[in-house]
Amino acid sequence: MTDDLFTAAAKTQLERRQPLAARLRPIRLDDVVGQQHLLGPGMALRQLIEADRLSSVILWGPPGTGKTTISKVVARSTSKAFVQLSAVTATVKDVREELARAEQRLGEREQATILFLDEVHRFNKAQQDSLLPAVESGLITLIGATTENPYFEVNAPLLSRSTLFRLEPLDDNAVAQLIRRGLEVEGATATDDAVEHLVARVGGDGRQSLTALEVAVALAAGDGNPPVVDLQHVEAALNVKAFRYGRDEHYDTISAFIKSIRGSDPDAAVYWLARMLEAGEDARFIARRLVVHASEDIGMADSQALVVAAAAAQAVEFVGLPEARINLAHATVYLATAPKSNRAYESINKAQEAARSAGGDVSMHLRDAHYKGAASLGHGAGYRYPHNDERGWVDQQYLPDELAGAQFYVPSRHGDEAIVADRLDQQRRWRAGGDDGPDG
């Protein structure tokens, strides 16, 4: 009896020493913050967990988005044995020993096993291959957690035998909810400025928000009890000064950023990028604006700009801040120094206006002629195949009759678009000269 009391008291003390993130870890699905696209009512992952019918899965997402939390909820809700390994420390021998135990468990008690493998991308090919037979036979249900793109880091055979669920960074409301829970557990309160700064700086990482909050509460406790966390406590916990950035500044700064790129001033563009990052602006929002700008203001003058912007947006997802600031700076400088043309942007505006006002049916020679009976309807009759002409072009009407001769795209003479302009001018000369080349 004494030993039991001592064990319980020791456990209580240990629990008090656990990090705040561990103490707040949910035990029910309804307590999980964020990931509603997976865990909301009626969503696939929630249904599988609640029915205890989870098959092998890969949970892919940035740090602090709930991969381990979800696995712990599974552990509490399943009738299967739950085993956890970390790919950072586990060896092939460890895996084989767990598989042997799983086989023994199944044979003796008819109890299946779930193996949660954290940081699965840290396993090399041989280590991942050692899991394949057990996953394929159903001896174990694998839950693999990774922060890296599984299409690059997880063996194709293992990935093909698992269902991939992607976790998203927590949005501001979810992070604020976590912080409020943490404050309640710590018996503390916080000013609005402190909470806003913490939410803005953690980039959707729930674990980081609670780790920083725990430090901030400890600092606040030195100033009074009960602790009141203010901005200076959060600044000290994050080692990042707050940069005042209200709603108006949000729109004004992104406007200055885009106009600096449009105006081909890389120094100003990078400065406004830095201002946004220092203010805690969502890196994905910045990346989206770069992708739009690449087509709206650069377009055909340098089509590589869109490739660079899209790559930066992808890097934001895969790498995350702070490192992704380098990718954003790369894209910003590239776009700012690229030749500019808004003609592709203008063309879709003009074309949409024409589509709304003029309409027009698809001409017979352009209609789909691949299905049975299409020819009897006249579909495709008179169509001329451009590849049969040595120029790769034929004089042929593609617009509806109501819009014949309309020009929506008018290329500039800037950058690569000058080459496009020359090509279209050549086609107009061919059309005016009546030289159609061989019949298509």
Image: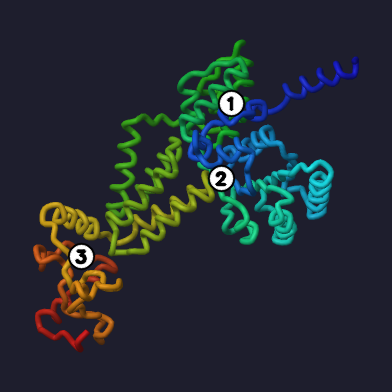
Label 1 Cα crowd, 10 Å radius (few <14 / some 14-19 / many 20+): many
Residue at 44% x, 31% y is: 243
Residue ranking furthest to the top: 225
Q: Residue at label 1?
A: 213
Residue type for callout 3: Ser
Residue for badge 3:
412
- Could you say which disc has been placed on residue 61 in the image? 2
Residues at circles 3 and 2 in contact by the CB criterion of under 8 Å: no
Location of residue 6 (image quadrant): top right
Mark 1 and mark 2: Cα distance apart in space: 22 Å
Q: What residue type is labelled 1?
A: Leu
User: Is residue 81 or residue 288 the one in the foreground?
Assistant: 81
* 376 relative to 31 in the view: left or right: left
Q: Is mark 1 on a helix, strand or loop?
A: helix
Mark 3–mark 2 Cα distance, whole angstroms, equals: 43 Å
Q: Where is residue 21 in the image (x, y as percent from the top left)?
A: 64, 29
On the rendered structure, is 350 left or right of 218? left
Chain-order first, disc 1 or disc 2: 2
Residue 168 placement (x, y as % from top left): 51, 42
Q: Which residue occupies 59% across, 46% down? A: 59
| Image quadrant assignment for residue 279 | top left
Q: Does the rendering let one see residue 423?
A: no
Is 315 drawn above or below residue 167 in the view shown? below
Q: Nearer the viewer, residue 359 or 138?
A: 138
Q: Which of marks 1 and 2 is in front?
A: 2
